[in-house]
Image (spheres, rainbow, N blue to C red):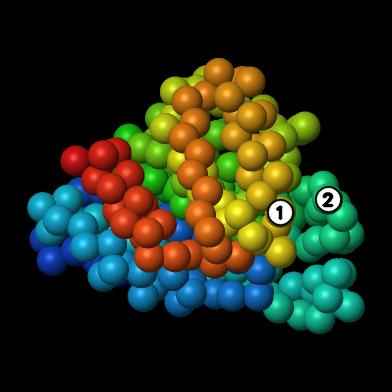
Amino acid sequence: MTQVSTVLPHVEINPQGPADATVIWLHGLGANGHDFEPIVPELRLPESLNVRFIFPHAPEIPVTINAGYVMPAWYDILEMNIDRKVDVDQLLRSAEWVHQFINRERERGIVAQRIIVIGFSQGGAVAYQAALTYPHKLGGLLGLSTYFATSDTINPHVENLSLPIEIHHGRFDPMVAESLGKEAAANLKSRGYQVNYRSYAMEHEVCFDQIEAISEWLQNQLG
């Protein structure tokens, strides 16, 4: 019998038939894996895609910018400046946890090219690091209202140089300025990645039009 890796606590939503693809979706600071769970039915994906959704729970740690208050977080944020000084070691550890989820899905029979990583806000910063450094070609990367925290230190893996990348951001985001989303897109394009950028008339959130776009993008990558 195949050995299945141990992973972080998480929410898992399985399709009616045997899973043939997996979406790993990371929440933002202070939330948990249930945060984006209600979006799954709203995506209205065809049953024929047989997509499994995994929503990991970040561990609870003290967060410096919130006076050391303990909350779910993928890494500590040390300063809330334009570039956001973060605990990079913790971010890298979280990216490794995502790799563990990907490895487990492959052990369960899902090929790497049918595994997509999505991250919102802080989870998006981890998603960039995790997807771009994974040693097998993945199905896609979607960054939502996020920033490329490890752009200066990342060592991307050659297997994912052609990774399909989608970036969404709110034009009125008071938490993560849209300039950071645009900066991430420009940085990735300068490295040769094919990036599609979309902006929406919203703040730090997800809107209906965006959910439709996410559904279309997932179907394009997995159809």
Q: Amino acid at mark 1?
A: Ala
| Residue at which label 2 appears | 82
Residue 84 lies left or right of residue 12; in this view the side is right
**Where is residue 110 drawn, in percent x and y?**
27, 45
Query: Which element is circle 1 on?
Result: loop
Q: Residue furthest bottom?
A: 69
Q: Residues within 10 Å of mark 1 (few under 14, many from 20)?
A: some
The quarter of the picture where residue 55 lies is bottom left
State whether residue 217 is above or below residue 136.
below
| Residue at which label 1 appears | 177
**Where is residue 48 drawn, in percent x and y?**
10, 52
Residue 36 lies left or right of residue 220; in this view the side is right
> For the image shown, how many numbered marks are present on the structure?
2
Question: At x 58% / y 42%, what residue is drawn?
Answer: 128
Give yes or no for contact between labels 1 and 2 (Cβ–Cβ under 8 Å).
Answer: yes
Please give the label number shown on residue 97.
none
